[in-house]
Image (spheres, grey):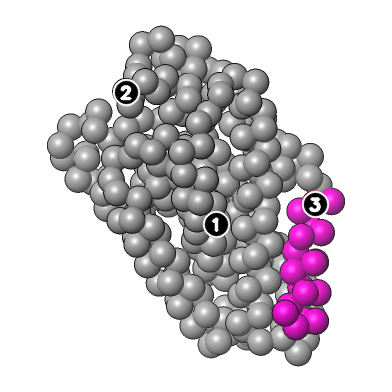
Amino acid sequence: MSKALRTLMYKELLRFWKVGFQTVGAPVLTALLYLLVFSHVLDRQVEVYGGVGYTAFLVPGLIMMSLLQNAFSNSSSSLIQSKVTGNLVFVLLTPISYREFFAAYVLAAVIRGLLVGAGVWAVTLWFVDLPYAHPLWILVFASLGGAIMASLGVIAGIWADKFDQLAAFQNFVVMPLTFLSGVFYSIHSLPEFWQRVSHVNPFFYMIDGFRYGFFGQSDVSPWISALVAGGSFVALALVTLNMLARGYKLRS
């Protein structure tokens, strides 16, 4: 790891860590509120998998949803803030390659996502005792999901020229895809048409594969989910690197 990459990554880590109460604590509280409301209403009425209560089913979805949203938020908000305030030029003037630029933003965003996910997992220990059928799959999908959303965040941060555009991207793209990915339900409970629609949503594979790591049960094979998630990351990484190499909306 080069000194330039370490320095930029440290800057990105410090940026969210200094306001950790807002960037880590607040998302954990939000997930906890979701858990309290949904588990209270549905825990005794819904059993998604055999022997798995609804609260237990819900927790991995909330962990992954929080991880994904915060990985996206970290890279996208950092870039748009730097563009709007005009200090991005000081980063671009440094002897750092576009690959190192990409790696620093993605790695910092993944770390924030993992921290938030770990925080959600920690607070839910008071409510449910989760099994850990395949811990390696948990790590694989947590890392892949964070990397995918971090890359998407870089794309959104580069594309957006103001905070309103970034908010629109998050509200009309990221939020719907996250909520309609099986966080709160199994897709087998949906009509056939909506099951097919769910299979087009890459977020579904990230959450379904992550949930498999806990219960050893899922709506699709974890290998298929890993293939879709891995392919999504490669595609987004290539798009992002191309934008950075061309200086798209960064150099004018």
Q: Residues within 10 Å of mark 2 (few under 14, many from 20)?
A: few
Q: Is residue 175 left or right of residue 118?
A: left
| Vertical side of 64 occupied by 7: above or below | below
| Pointer 2 or 3: first along the chain | 3
- For mark 1, does the 10 Å Cα neighbourhood hold few (<14), some (14 to 19), or many (20 or more) residues? some
Q: Residue drawn at (45%, 66%), measured in percent from left and top?
A: 233
The residue range painted magenta reads: 1-18
Against 145, is 239 above or below?
A: below
Q: Which residue is mark 2?
A: 50
* Spot occupied by residue 240 in the image (x, y as percentages of width and height): 51, 75
Give me the residue at 55% from left, 38% from top. Answer: 63
The mark nearer the N terminus, 1 or 2, is 2
Q: Secondary structure at mark 2?
A: loop
Q: Is residue 39 left or right of residue 95?
A: left
Sequence order check: which comes first, mark 1 or mark 3?
3
| Image point (57%, 46%), residue name | 67
Q: Is residue 15 magenta?
A: yes
Q: In the picture, residue 31 is in which quadrant?
A: top right
Question: Would residue 61 appear left or right of 78 to someone viewing this image?
Answer: left
Camera-side mark, 2 or 3: 2
Foreground of the two, 198 or 136: 136
Q: CA distance from mark 1 to mark 3?
A: 19 Å
Residue matched to label 1: 143
User: Looking at the image, which residue sits at the far front?
Assistant: 133
Which element type, helix, strand or loop, lies under badge 3? helix
Tell me the tag on residue 17.
Answer: 3
Q: In the image, what residue type sits under mark 3? A: Trp
Rendering coords of residue 206 (x, y %): 42, 50
Split into 4 quadrants, where in the image is the N terminus? bottom right
Inter-mark Cα distance, 2 to 3? 40 Å
